Image: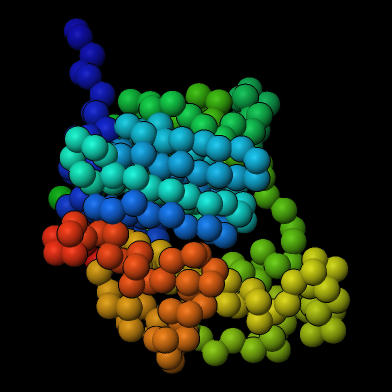
Amino acid sequence: MPQPSPLSAQALADLLIRADSSVHLGMNACLQPQSLRSISIPVPTLTMALEGQKTMIIGESTYISSKGAAILIPAHTEFRIENVPSPQTGRFFGVSLRFDPETITQFRQIYGATFAEWDTRPKWHMPAQGFLLDALAAWVDWTQRYGTDTNHSRHRLLEILLLLARHGYGGNLLLEQTDRWAQRIENLLMLDPAREWRIGEVCARLGVSESTLRRHLGAEDVGFRDLLEKVRLETGLMHVMETDLQIAQVAMACGYQSQSRFAERFRLRFGMSPVALRQTRRAGGADVVSLARPG
């Protein structure tokens, strides 16, 4: 019996453009080029361009994704990106899978004994793979038919991680984990970026004294307020790129009472203002790429 052909990257893009972004599955579309710097994602992430081209600069290395090729990014890796629309369609469309700590922990518990059988060497780039495109399409199809929740999304991520690991592409997502205190704090702040976090509350939740925490952060050459702003701005970047929320709403959701303050800090960090980045979803200042808001 002949095997069905895997879904094409373009067909998957056409399917995903009508879907919702979520905590684990992020989508970004634009009609004008995007160029952003100093991005750091706090969790292991797989990102790919399905339409157009994504160029990612990490240190002195450059990785290019198009037509479903993927880039595999360890947690807390800083990079620059350039997203360029396709000359044929005039649109860029990319998708990212974000593997939260609970997903990684569950995967280790279930499959940790099998690690020795897999190639876990760090690999940053993966050519387009039919199994990955088909797995994403099945996830979105199920969601549109029956809805989903965090547990179901995590189950889908475990399936995808298993496929990646068996094909030798799990190293960057599974093994690049550290015990840096800055990362522990970021993971906590991410739960509610808009909250008026105080270092005393963070210490209580992490079970450590304030003097000890400050000493750890000093050793890592980072300050608490810097971490809080980093988390808030990176959350804002996700909202600007992946939702239709107004910029004022994004600012409030990230803990900024002033939209102008948010815009200023956003531009200084990423090299584009929130308004300029949102405008990349317009062609000639008029037509907007429609993206569903996260549910």
Residue at 47%, 86% in the rendered image:
261
In the image, taking residue 270 as reference, residue 14 lies left or right, namely: left
Q: Residue at x 64, y 89 (%)?
A: 198
Q: Quadrant of residue 3?
A: top left
- Residue 290: % across, % down: 17, 60
Query: Relative to 203, does residue 86 appear above or below in the rendering?
Result: above
Judge by depth and name the residue closer to the eye, 242 or 193: 242
The answer to whether residue 288 is visible is no
Which residue in the rendered view is the most extreme toward the front?
284
> Residue 212, percent across and down?
85, 79
Is 81 displayed left or right of 15 in the figure?
Answer: right
Question: What residue sits 83% from the left and 73% below the top?
Answer: 218
Give coordinates of residue 229: x percent, y percent: 57, 77
Image vertical order of residue 76 relative to residue 217, above or below: above
Q: Is residue 229 left or right of residue 21?
A: right
Q: Is residue 9 above or below residue 215?
A: above
The answer to whether residue 141 is above or below residue 2 is below
Query: Is residue 168 toward the left or the right of residue 85 in the image?
Result: right
Horizontal and vertical percent position of residue 133: 31, 33
Q: If the image is split into quadrants, where does the N terminus sit? A: top left
Colour scheme: rainbow
User: Closer to the camera, 173 or 35?
Assistant: 35
Q: Quadrant of the C terminus?
A: bottom left
Q: Please tell me in which quadrant of the rendered image residue 66 appears.
A: top left
How many numbered badges does the structure rendering display? 0
Residue 269 visible (yes or no): yes
Q: Residue furthest top?
A: 1
Q: Tell me what residue is drawn at x 32 percent, y 32 percent.
A: 67
